[in-house]
Image (tube, rainbow, N blue to C red):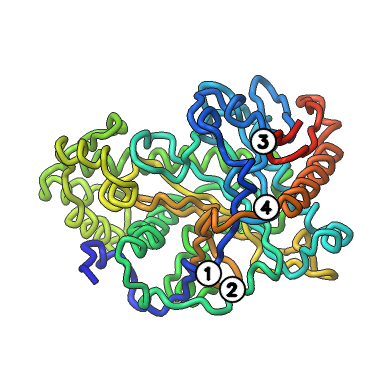
Amino acid sequence: MRPDRFAALYPRGLDRMRVAWEHLRIPGPPAEYALTRTEVEHPDPERRFARRTIGEILCDGDRLALIDKASPHSLFDLMVSEISDPPKATPCAVAPVTGGVLWRTGLAFVRFVSDPQVMRRFDLADGELHLALNCDPNTHDRESVQAAKQFHLHLLYWGGEALKPLESAGRFGAVADARLRRQAIDPLAFLGAQLIHASLAGFDLGIPGARLATPDDRLTIRGERPLGCLIELPGWQVLGDPAFEDLIRRLHLRLEAIAADLLEVFTGQRRAPSPWHRHALRPHADIARGLGALPVSARIRAGLRELSLALRDLPVSTARRLERSDARRRMDLMTLNQPCYALNLHAPARNRLGAVLNDAGVVHLTIQPKLFSGIGGAGLLGLGGVPSVRILRGEGRLSVESWHRRGDFQREFAEFNQCLQGDDPDIRFGPLKRFVDPSTGWA
């Protein structure tokens, strides 16, 4: 195994952490539902998503759509996405009413899969749920955690049967592939969580009962706490409160400020570079002086110093070669532009009849900063008590019958969501479509 120059950023004992990076394999759609060239390349999201749009929601100048994903993370998933052109990539780029509808749609998803009749009809018992949002507005060259720059939320559910392969999860130390290790456990995974936590000192979460948890690497390695900066919420119902939309908006602004401050310390610049370029690093002595002026602890400052020593300049000639190279090499050598993060919502409990997810007393809101890892929060998360699970998508193909069952689940959820939110005078639901067949899609 080649040495990792970022090894000093990882905590002691990480080799013991359980990981499942080859275990959870999700089939892709039937062949006839594969993406066409237009669906891959067209700049207008309405055209790209036309065959997969279940229904639209118009809200204050923005347009949200419920979308059947072309490459699912689970049998029972979908996403709600802003579909304006040009794209609106961040929580601050959309109107507050739009963000509110998105988060209430996430809450509706929790309530839907917690319905005992729905659980029985779709065999959802003993499953887990994640709501995942990726934000990376400034990386327009290499592969990113936010491939489509629309502001969107993944609604993800895995039934108990789907999670059984995680029982044979291995350990981080047993993974020999150095590139995979860095992609799955980003160099900022632990240091970044500490930095974000420190930056939120005195930050008003604005939600009674919400609590910013102190980072504890040992608990994370043992699987008792998720990766990332953790905020504990007093149940799922907070997603329906306008204060939650405001919290996500304010968190993004804080992350933008942290990113700009660090970029200035490391490079002397505060704006993201142009595609296929990276700002040159300042001399080490200048970086050290800049770090000394940051209002952070000695531990975080030392970690940032280690990061500065591990980073290298990216010459223009190398960037040009990477532009023509394969994705794995780009993701291994090119940093993501900041701010770049995955935000996840997850209740640390299984969904069981008599103890449904909607009744969870604590919900984890985690923020995972990314520096190299192009795997977003929907494809790399904690599941089944395993802190780091990679979702391998497109592993074979689902049958047409299974895809119709998935469509039934999605259509029922869309109807459920419309019943919950349809009385809001600030939004308007468009007609719901039905899944016809893989060639036609939703119509």
User: Is residue 209 visible in the rendered structure shown here?
Assistant: no
Q: Secondary structure at mark 2?
A: helix
Residue type (three-letter) at the residue carrying disc 3: Arg
Q: Earlier in the sequence, mark 1 or mark 2?
A: 1
**How many angstroms separate mark 2 from mark 4 (CA)?**
38 Å
Residue type (three-letter) at the residue carrying disc 2: Pro
Location of the C terminus by quadrant is: top right
The residue that appears at 51% across and 76% down in the rendered structure is: 169
**Is disc 1 in contact with disc 2, using a CB cutoff of under 8 Å?**
yes
Q: Earlier in the sequence, mark 3 or mark 2?
A: 3
Count of numbered badges drawn on the protein: 4
Q: Relative to 81, does residue 127 appear above or below in the rendering?
A: below
Residue type (three-letter) at the residue carrying disc 1: His
Q: Relative to 295, does residue 320 appear above or below in the rendering?
A: above
Disc 3 designates what residue?
A: 52
Say which mark, if any, is on residue 23.
1
Say which mark, if any, is on residue 208.
4
Residue 410 rendering spot, x and y as whole percentages? 76, 45
Location of the N terminus by quadrant is: bottom left
Disc 2 designates what residue?
A: 165
Residue 4 rendering spot, x and y as whole percentages? 23, 65
Q: Relative to 278, does residue 132 appear above or below in the rendering?
A: below
Say which mark, if any, is on residue 429.
none
Q: Earlier in the sequence, mark 1 or mark 3?
A: 1
Position of 184 compared to 39: left or right?
left
Q: Earlier in the sequence, mark 3 or mark 4?
A: 3
Q: Nearer the viewer's eye, disc 2 or disc 4? A: 2
The residue that appears at 52% across and 74% down in the rendered structure is: 223
Position of 219 compared to 298: left or right?
right
